[in-house]
Amino acid sequence: MIDVRRLRILREVAVAGTISGAARALGYTPSAVSQQLATLARESGAELLRRRGRHVELTAEGRLLVEVAERVGAELEAAEAELAARAARPGGVVRLLAFATALRTLVPRAATTLAASAPGLELEIDEADPDDALRLLVQERADVVIAHDYDLLERRRSARVHRRELLGDELRVVGAVDDAVSPKRRAGRVGATGGRAPAAPARRAPAAAVDLAALADRRWVLPDRGSACDRVVERACAAAGFAPRVVARSSDFAAIAALAEACDAVALVPRLALEGQAEERAGRPLRAPVRRRLFAAVRDGAQRRPLESAVLDALADAAA
């Protein structure tokens, strides 16, 4: 009989690509992982892994067992969800991971809702970027995560993950963009009518959309190097025909916006990160929008658990 716990170890090796990486994720020593894999190979009567330098790759039999592990994991999640649903007053801890902007906006609203609607539920909240959060979710080290997908950077979907779409977002231009507005917009500025300022409008016009190519000669503030947001900005600029001249970087969008303004530079910042800002600091849209989608995720089957379901509903309400 194949041990389900050893299937989980094999799945972690498949995710990490190394014995040591799987050991770190599971909290085991590398030698303990190797011993469990050797036992699993004997139980299954098949070679499961091949070494490729520092990495390992699955054989066809190994891939088959990982697929089995995925199905077994989903079935166990569903069984636990059914048992939890039968509890008279469900309660317990839900480990929630989210990236910084969601922690500042969506999570507090959801937490307030849950405090009133699900008093038996206790949230354990921590920050994690989307890639790490989804990895920890699959490794059963988190229960609910908030992540995002960019149109320019789609991530591969896992059969083990159930998604609840939350909201659409887009990047806005912040910083020194006054001269990058459309010609029509420039014509209405002081000096365009012989030095006479136009009459003040009764209502402020929407911020003019900006062509990304018009920012090619600007100084740029970018997200931290190698992050998903950094790669998206680099790809968007490349599609517009230029590479940004970087003068600063940060992982904090508030810092990015502040640095862009202080350094006479520009930056692309998600609209959600600018929530609550005064109109003049809320950025300008791109003429060719760069969009992303925010979603909440649980392991497939867990969406039927009362606790996870309550958190998903609260996050959806917070995003509405």
Image: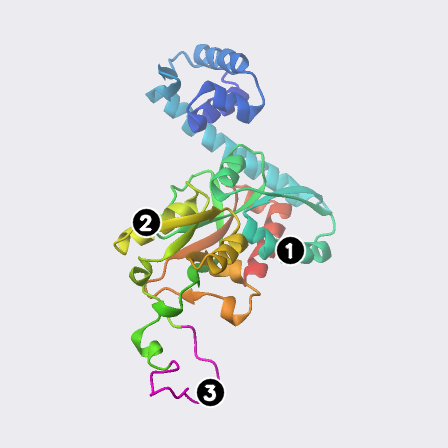
The residue shown at (38%, 45%) is 231
The residue shown at (39%, 51%) is 150
Examine the rendering and report whether any part of residue 9 can be seen.
Answer: no
Q: How is the image coloured?
A: rainbow
Viewer-proximal residue, 65 or 221?
221
Three-letter code, disc 2: Arg
Where residue 183 appears, x then y in whole percent?
A: 30, 75
Q: Residue 203: say if magenta.
A: yes
- Marks 2,3: beta carbons within 8 A: no
Q: What residue span does the magenta drawing correspond to? A: 189-207
Marker disc for residue 200? 3
- Marks 1,3: beta carbons within 8 A: no
Say few, some or many: other residues with alpha carbon within 10 Å of mark 1 (under 14 / 14 to 19 / 20 or more). some
Which is in the foreground here, disc 2 or disc 3?
3
SS for callout 1: helix
The overriding secondary structure of the stretch rendered in magenta is: loop
Three-letter code, disc 1: Pro
Q: Earlier in the sequence, mark 2 or mark 1?
A: 1
> What residue did someone put label 1 on?
108
The Cα atoms of the two marked residues, 1 and 3, are separated by 39 Å
Q: Residue 42: say if magenta.
A: no
Three-letter code, disc 3: Ala
Where residue 301 appears, x then y in whole percent?
A: 53, 41
The residue shown at (47%, 40%) is 131
Viewer-proximal residue, 177 or 17?
177
Which is in the foreground here, disc 1 or disc 3?
3
Where residue 78 appears, x then y in whole percent?
A: 55, 39
The Cα atoms of the two marked residues, 2 and 3, are separated by 39 Å
> What residue did someone put label 2 on?
235
Which is in the foreground here, disc 2 or disc 1?
2
